[in-house]
Image (spheres, rainbow, N blue to C red):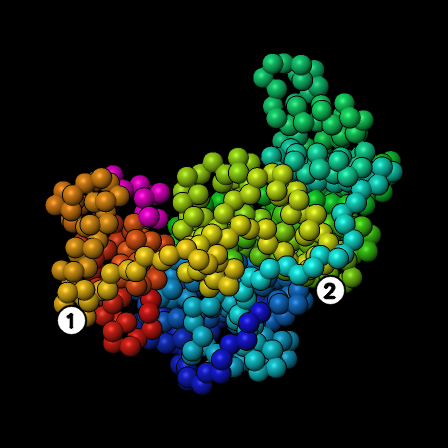
Amino acid sequence: WAQLGQHKKPIVLADIDGSADATVLLVPPADGTPQSAVELVWRALKRLHDNGSHARLWVLTRGVHEGANLTHSPLWGLARVAAAEHPELWGGVLDLGLDDEVPAAVLGALTGHGVVVVRDGVAYTARLAPTTACAGAPMTCSPGATYLITGGTGALGLRMAQRLADLGARRLVLLSRSGLPGRHTWAAENQSEAVRVVTALEERGVSVHVVALDVSDLGAAEVLRAELRGLPAVRGVVHAAGVEAGAFLVNTTVEDFAATMRPKVDGALLLHELFPPGVLDWMVLFSSCGYLAGFPGQGAYACANAYLDGFARHRRSLGDRTVAVGWTAWRGLGMGSQSAFVAAQLEALGMGTVGADDAMRALDLVMRDGDPNVVVLPVLPAAVGVPMLADLAPTGEQQVAAPSPASGSGEAATPDWVSEQVLAVVAAELGLTAGDVDPRLPLVEIGVDSIMTVAVRRELEKRTGLALPPTLLWEHPTAAAVTARIVELLDRESAGQVLT
């Protein structure tokens, strides 16, 4: 956590319906559920967006940094995605100590960081840094113990089952919502990957017990207790359950949040109930690093993973060896690995992917590190433009100088110059000439798909020097509308206003 400078800019607290430039401070109740806290903040953000407000929304949390407040921990994920998708509306999450007063100066001056932690009057924001010497105990498995994996028949769960067997595990319990088909079908030629992996494990002498169980269901704890009864004590747990999610925040629904958060959040609470701190040798939670860089379209998923990160800190504070691993995408495996849109966004953010073998080697280092939150991520040169990753971005590659917005004019960028840039970028992406692009037609109608929008936005950022929100081409669907929005942003910048 890097210390931020001192700021003394005053703020104005505004009603949420206000359209004036102001700051809205939202304080979610601490006695609700993680999902109710998320819904409250999401509804406030959406209301400001729908009303065309110019206010900035800040959210107050307490004790999330230390893992003392799990109810509000998902808001850290929501915050980082909201900062990327709606920089004109989002101020950030302000996390205070349990007894700290609200520092108004922070709300007035430190927008754009996603999450700001204030302790003893000093403001901090997070940055990734390389792990130090990993001298802790390695991850081990005992042949006489049982090891449990949620999401156990998914691609990553199966890979972890193989890894635990390599480490000496001889009894595995794999939980999944669907389970496996009856053994009488296993001889069929069209075997699933799960059946093939389980069969191979059993041929190695590993006892594999597959349980069809949704870890977020009411009564799941009693069902799991019954399944584990008679087996040796569980000594290690991998929580890899999760569901896919992908929608901008303004298009996300309450049902989307519930479906995405339940497996990770409710599953973690189930494991916490069955295996209190101190009972296990280790617990590994499968989180994701995408939200740390403000990965657009993953608001609900970000909430779920931020909860796991806070949950790991919480159990560590109680003396448990729990770690949440913020994975990047695994090549060819897991959620989003086949999505070209996800791949394009990762590349734009300077985030590489990992192969399964490299992921397993990284996990060995993670378990030796001793920190509750560790990220596994190859960082690419483009990360230099992402504050969370900038300190780790590779150097030495020549950066191409972007054209100046005032190019050839000697004054602020004109609408004609901006229009030329927009049409040129769109045309290049489509393999056309600028004259072939009708600025009045919706971009989707002339062939710009979701993957292309990433490349178009990044190129426009280079040409204009602006940080453009990922929603730009969705909320401004024609080249003319994009031009008008960019002109507005450049005018604000030249007038010394807050860049949105």
Q: Position of residue 192 (x, y in %)?
A: 60, 23
Is residue 230 visible to the viewer in this orientation of the structure? Answer: yes
Quarter of the image for residue 249 reads: bottom left
Q: Which residue is located at x 85 percent, y 37 percent? A: 143
Is residue 227 left or right of 463 when viewed as pictured?
right
Element type where label 1 sits in the image: loop
User: In the rendered image, which quarter contains the C terminus?
Assistant: bottom left
- Residue 40 is a magenta residue: no
Which amino acid is tagged 1?
Gly
Q: Which residue is located at x 51 percent, y 76 percent? A: 4
Q: Is residue 218 above or below residue 127?
A: above
Mark 2 or 1, closer to the camera: 1
Q: Position of residue 80 (x, y in %)?
A: 48, 60
Is residue 265 left or right of 102 when viewed as pictured?
right
Q: Is residue 116 above or below residue 318?
A: below
Which amino acid is tagged 2?
Ser
Quick one: label 1, few (<14), some, or many (20+) residues within 10 Å?
few
Which mark is first along the chain, 1 or 2?
2
Q: Which residues are magenta?
A: 447-455
Q: Which residue is mark 2?
A: 317
Q: Position of residue 455 (x, y in %)?
A: 33, 48
Which label is found at residue 270? none
Q: Which residue is located at x 29 percent, y 49 percent? A: 456
- Choose between 52 and 86: the one closer to the eye: 86
Which label is found at residue 410? 1
Give me the C-alpha separation between circle 2 and circle 1: 58 Å
